[in-house]
Image: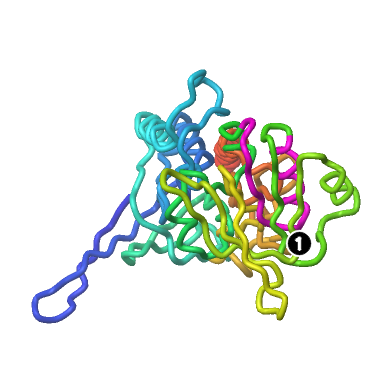
């Protein structure tokens, strides 16, 4: 149910503000959000989905997706997300542009507000806002995104078989990405700005003993270059020190592995989160510490960060929502 109010702004201007009640509100439009919408729509929950700032989610930052089941030749990432969106709408989901900017989860129904000031009362909430990869902040990262720059070795490593790549980072994630890529690429550089790896001992041992991994310590990336995609990186060793050394390496792929930031600011202080801001869910469930609120996809997954895993948890969330509402 939607009620519309007319607010006067003076000089005959006005703003339409709506107050709406919905069974299920889904925030986020990646594989988790769209899959939740498909399942919720088929369960006649009349879901409303807000796409957020990045419709399609993190998956749209890559090009061809080859590891999503059902597409033996791969599929363009944006096309895959458009197919999911259309499927959700086919089964009754109300997919909207825009973002949710306020959320009060202190009581049910939950009260939220979108960027236009529209108020929504939701009986249940599925949070699928994802997690954003951290980048170095170089203009070249944006320039070559999808043309050699990636934040997911599992997603894009296959395209760099028998080629040379670089991994930025010195923690466990960077070591895991480097090890994965070492099984595909001819050579893997690890660009580590500190004099040592921060990873666990077992991970340090693995990368240092791997023949085709070369670790560049005390090194920063200051730029990328290439006429048709990434062909190399401009590096600085001992940046700012008297013995500073500038040099280039030839690479075909540049992988960021310096962490992800979950998009959970809206819910801080309300939902239980881990030390990194990922939403904590109950074991074998998408349920959060607040009854009626569920989290799906990368926003609650610091481990896998895969589209197919996100889609699976989106399905879980919608099924749990349906069962929850049936008990009310």
Return the residue nearer the eye: 266 or 304: 304
**Does residue 313 appear in the picture of this structure?**
no
**Does residue 114 appear in the picture of this structure?**
yes
Q: How is the image coloured?
A: rainbow
Residue at 36% over, 43% down? 95
Report x, y in % for residue 278.
66, 57
Residue at 68% over, 35% down? 186
Return the residue nearer the eye: 205 or 88: 205
Return the residue nearer the eye: 230 or 199: 230
Residue 164 lies in magenta, yes or no? yes
Apparent side of residue 317 relative to residue 101 in the rendered image (left or right): right
Which part of the image, by quadrant, shows the C terminus? top right
Apparent side of residue 254 relative to residue 139 in the rendered image (left or right): right
- Relative to residue 241, is residue 83 depicted above or below? above
SS label for mark 1: loop
Report x, y in % for residue 313.
61, 38
Q: Which residues are magenta?
A: 161-182
Q: Residues within 10 Å of mark 1 (few under 14, many from 20)?
A: some
Report x, y in % for residue 153.
63, 41
């Amino acid at each position: 149910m939607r009620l519309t109010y007319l607010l006067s702004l003076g000089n005959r201007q006005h703003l339409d503000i709506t107050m709406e009640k919905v069974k299920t509100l889904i925030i986020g439009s990646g594989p988790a959000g769209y899959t939740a919408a498909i399942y919720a729509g088929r369960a006649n929950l009349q879901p409303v989905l807000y796409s957020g700032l990045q419709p399609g989610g993190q998956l749209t930052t890559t090009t061809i997706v080859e590891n999503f089941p059902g597409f033996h030749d791969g599929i363009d990432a944006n096309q895959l997300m458009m197919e999911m969106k259309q499927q959700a709408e086919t089964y009754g989901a109300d997919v909207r542009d825009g973002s949710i900017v306020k959320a009060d989860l202190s009581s049910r129904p939950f009260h939220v507000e979108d960027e236009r000031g529209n108020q929504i009362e939701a009986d249940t909430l599925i949070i699928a806002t994802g997690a954003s990869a951290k980048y170095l902040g170089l203009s070249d990262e944006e320039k070559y995104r999808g043309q050699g720059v990636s934040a997911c070795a599992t997603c894009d490593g296959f395209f760099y078989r028998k080629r040379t790549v670089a991994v930025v980072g010195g923690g466990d994630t960077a070591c895991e990405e480097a090890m994965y890529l070492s099984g595909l690429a001819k050579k893997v550089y690890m660009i580590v700005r500190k004099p040592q790896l921060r990873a666990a001992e077992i991970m340090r041992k693995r990368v240092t003993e791997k023949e085709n991994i070369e670790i560049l310590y005390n090194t920063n990336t200051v730029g990328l270059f290439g006429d048709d995609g990434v062909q190399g990186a401009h590096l600085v060793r001992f940046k700012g020190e008297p013995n500073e050394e500038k040099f280039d390496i030839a690479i075909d792929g540049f992988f960021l592995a310096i962490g992800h930031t979950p998009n959970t600011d809206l819910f801080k202080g309300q939902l239980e989160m881990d030390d990194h801001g990922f939403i904590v869910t109950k074991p074998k469930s998408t349920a959060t510490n607040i009854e009626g609120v569920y989290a799906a996809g990368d926003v609650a997954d610091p481990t896998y960060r895969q589209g197919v895993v996100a889609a699976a948890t989106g399905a879980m969330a919608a099924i749990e929502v349906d069962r929850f509402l049936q008990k009310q």
